[in-house]
Image (spheres, grey):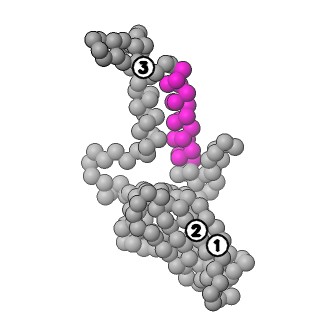
Amino acid sequence: MELANLLTAGDTLNFTAVVSDYPATGGWTLKYHLAPRVSGSVIDITATASGSDYLVQVSSSTTGGWAAGYYTWSAYVEKAGERYTVSRGQLEIRAASASMAAGVDNRTHARKVLDAIRAVIENRATLDQQEYTIGNRSLKRMTGDELQRLEKSYATRVADEETIAAGGIAGPLGRVRYGVPN
């Protein structure tokens, strides 16, 4: 009954959801609601009955119109005025590479910041001053320890994003990969 953690706009969405407590044969309807975290349009999906299970299918022409970004989703069942949430999660919709213009930087914010921090660390090898003043202007750089702490923080964020994108669960208990639903 779960959506993958990563979808690509323009790909067909096709999987079977099993909600044993609320089977399709009992008159229940399964729906998904995807709400963008920042801005954009809400996406609603209604599954069709497939025996007691549910078939979730969305054509590539439909997903091709979905905006790239991060979404919070919930799956719920409905019948005769009753509604129950059966699952929820987070997912990222990525733009299809075929639709991207040349030179588009589609790295995540965390990846961009991590790359910038690492570039600063690399360039520090040629700088020997921590701070300097010219006239009434001064410049003070972060210490090596501060840069290393910041680099470690963003490296963890990027690792979490990559684990989630690969269908795993990220967090302080470890980065464990699980299979992506069919």
Residue position for label 1: 85
Disc 2 or disc 3, which is closer to the eye?
3
Q: Residue at x 36, y 12 (%)?
A: 132
Question: Marks 2/3: CA distance?
Answer: 45 Å
Residue 122 is marked as none
Per the model, the C-alpha gap separating discs 1 and 2 is 7 Å
In reply to whether residue 174 is colored magenta, the answer given is no
Question: Which badge, 2 or 3, comes first in the chain's sequence?
Answer: 2
The residue that label 2 is drawn on is: 74
Mark 3 neighbour class, 10 Å CA radius: few under 14, some 14 to 19, many 20 or more: few
User: Which of the labelled discs sits on residue 141, or is there none?
Assistant: 3
Query: Callout 1: 10 Å neighbours few (<14), some, many (20+)?
Result: few
Q: Is residue 128 left or right of residue 158?
A: left
Mark 3 residue type: Arg
Other-residue count near label 2 (Cα within 10 Å), few / some / many at <14 / 14–19 / ≥20: some
Say whether residue 129 is visible: yes
Question: Element type at marker 2?
Answer: strand
Dots 1, 2 in contact, CB < 8 A: yes
Q: Which residues are magenta?
A: 145-163
Q: Which residue appears at 33% of the width and 12% of the height?
A: 133
On the rendered image, what quadrant is the N terminus found in?
A: bottom right
**SS class, disc 3:** loop
Q: Name the amino acid, label 2.
A: Ser
As drawn, is 95 to the left or to the right of 53?
Answer: left
Instruction: Give the percent coordinates (x, y) of residue 8.
Output: 43, 60
Per the model, the C-alpha gap separating discs 1 and 3 is: 50 Å
The stretch drawn in magenta includes residue 159: yes
Q: Quadrant of residue 137?
A: top left
> Which of disc 3 and disc 1 is earlier in sequence?
1
Q: Residue at x 40, y 10 (%)?
A: 129
